[in-house]
Amino acid sequence: MSATPTPSSLFPIVTSNPPASIDEVIRIMEKLDAALTENDGLKWFNLLYLQVTHQVQQHPPQDGWKAPIWLVRLDVIFATLYFNAIADSLSGKAIPSSWQALFEARQRTGIDRIQFALAGMNAHINHDLALALLAINNEMHQGFSAGTPEHQDYQHVNDLLEAVLPQALTLLATGILGQFAEDTGKIGKLLAIWNVRVARDLAWAFAEHVQSLPPPFQSFALASQDQFTGTLGRSLLVPIQ
């Protein structure tokens, strides 16, 4: 069985060239996919993330994105938080509880690929997405009102993810490189626990709430959310019978 990739193999991938576009985000995730071994749970989240990023890139609304500059920048900030979590973990720095739930289980046996994938989605959306929304609001000051061009694009991404996530999880479950793995009936059980649209809508609402708080309370709210997300991530990584 292959060992977990060493910092020398993954660290340069996530630190050498910070992405500035969705194409660059995809290239980094493709390099991670090539470097991660099949017994490493992180591989399955990374592959799911890569698949859904391709889908978002290839399926804009019929009338085009309404705030394309904002959307690309959000995607880059968002993905960079994932790459930074890998880099910090490899270099021995403290990482959020939400990501620790996945990283501590990367080599654990008895856990399905789809569980690793959803545990990563949980960390990335329930923890990182609000941080990305707060960061881009500090840059562009677009606010969090419903019905804005930014919010309409955000909702279209929700529609895409809700449609493609079950298909992407089925691909993970029914065979990578010709292998047949988990019972795909488990996908429905997991999606009943963790719903991507609900998670993204909550991230938007949570970012709006945090933005309204005084700075000391912002830190407390973000820390509490991280702890909750870590607990949920660990529940997603319990072997399913």
Image: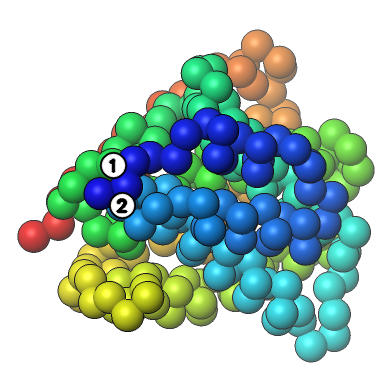
- Residue positioned 45% across, 74% down in the render: 168
Disc 2 and disc 1: Cα gap in Å? Answer: 6 Å
Label total for image: 2
* Left or right: 73, with 185 as reference point: right
Q: Nearer the viewer, residue 206 or 177?
A: 177
- Helix, strand or loop under label 1: loop
Question: Image height check: is 59 above or below 8?
Answer: below
The residue sitting at the bottom extreme is 62
Q: Which of 83 and 70 is in front in this view?
A: 83
The numbered mark at residue 107 is 1
Task: Give the mark nearer the N terminus: 2 vs 1.
Answer: 2
Name which residue type carries label 2. Answer: Asn
The quarter of the picture where residue 207 lies is top right
Q: Are marks 2 and 1 in contact (CB under 8 Å)?
A: yes
The numbered mark at residue 239 is none
The residue sitting at the left extreme is 241
Q: Can residue 236 be seen in this view?
A: no
In the rendered image, which residue does mark 2 sit on? Answer: 39
- Residue positioned 63% across, 66% down in the render: 53
Name which residue type carries label 1. Answer: Gln
| Mark 2 burial class by Cα count in 10 Å: few <14, some 14-19, many 20+ | some
x then y, percent, for residue 184: 24, 76
